[in-house]
Image (cartoon, grey):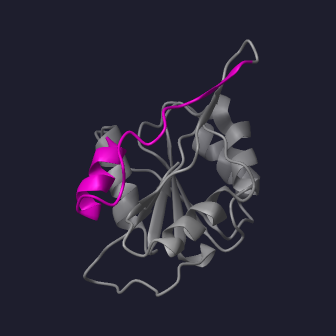
Amino acid sequence: MSLLRWVSRRRPLPRTLATHDLTIGVPVHRGLRWANVISENLANVPADATILISDCTREDACLRELRRRHRRDRRVRFTQGDVSLGWREHINQLILSSRSAVFSILPQDDSVAEGHYESLIDALNASPAAVLAFPRLVGEYPDGSQHDHRPIPFALGHEDVTEEALRLWY
């Protein structure tokens, strides 16, 4: 659920990013059981962002159900990729099909709160050299407990920003 500043020679970046500069990719795989979570997440996505929902495996009726639910939502575009694509290739396909300055992957089983993407865009605007922004992650477990995931594993601002982004991403 991090936010990647899309650096491209084909399109200059805007001076200040806004939610209309955002595309959110939702890769689906056997996602029918997560359709309610995906729909809840769409309610928390900024009104002027673009949402790409894609299913390459086509192993259940998730895409059909989401199309039915969100057919009037002008933010949402649905795609069916090549069934031979693996997860990485599927994500890359979503990133490359984005026409926005910033991109975020939203896994089908994750939840985002209202204001999530706005806070990430604010973080990128506060650090114009940054190419990646990510939130505090809190895991919620079936027993009701919560756990903060690891903090940033190293001090930022001491390496090339691209190298730092890659270290954080993986």
Would you identify the image quadrant in which residue 162 lies? bottom left
Q: Is residue 155 magenta?
A: yes
Name the residue: 42% across, 36% down: 57
From the viewer's perspective, is 43 left or right of 30? right
The image position of residue 142, as x and y in percent, is 71, 15
From the viewer's perspective, is 21 left or right of 85? right
The image position of residue 48, as x and y in percent, is 67, 74
Name the residue: 52% across, 84% down: 16
Residue 82 showing in the rendered view: no
Q: Is residue 104 magenta?
A: no
Q: Is residue 170 above or below residue 131?
A: above
Q: Is residue 51 above or below residue 36?
A: below
Residue 95 showing in the rendered view: yes
Q: Nearer the viewer, residue 147 or 60?
A: 147
Q: Nearer the viewer, residue 60 or 96?
A: 96
Q: Nearer the viewer, residue 101 or 133?
A: 133
Question: The C terminus lies in which quarter of the figure?
Answer: top left
Tell me where the magenta segment starts and ends, as one range: 145-170
From the viewer's perspective, is 138 left or right of 130? right
Name the residue: 46% across, 63% down: 103
The image position of residue 166, as x and y in percent, is 28, 51
The image position of residue 161, as x and y in percent, is 29, 63
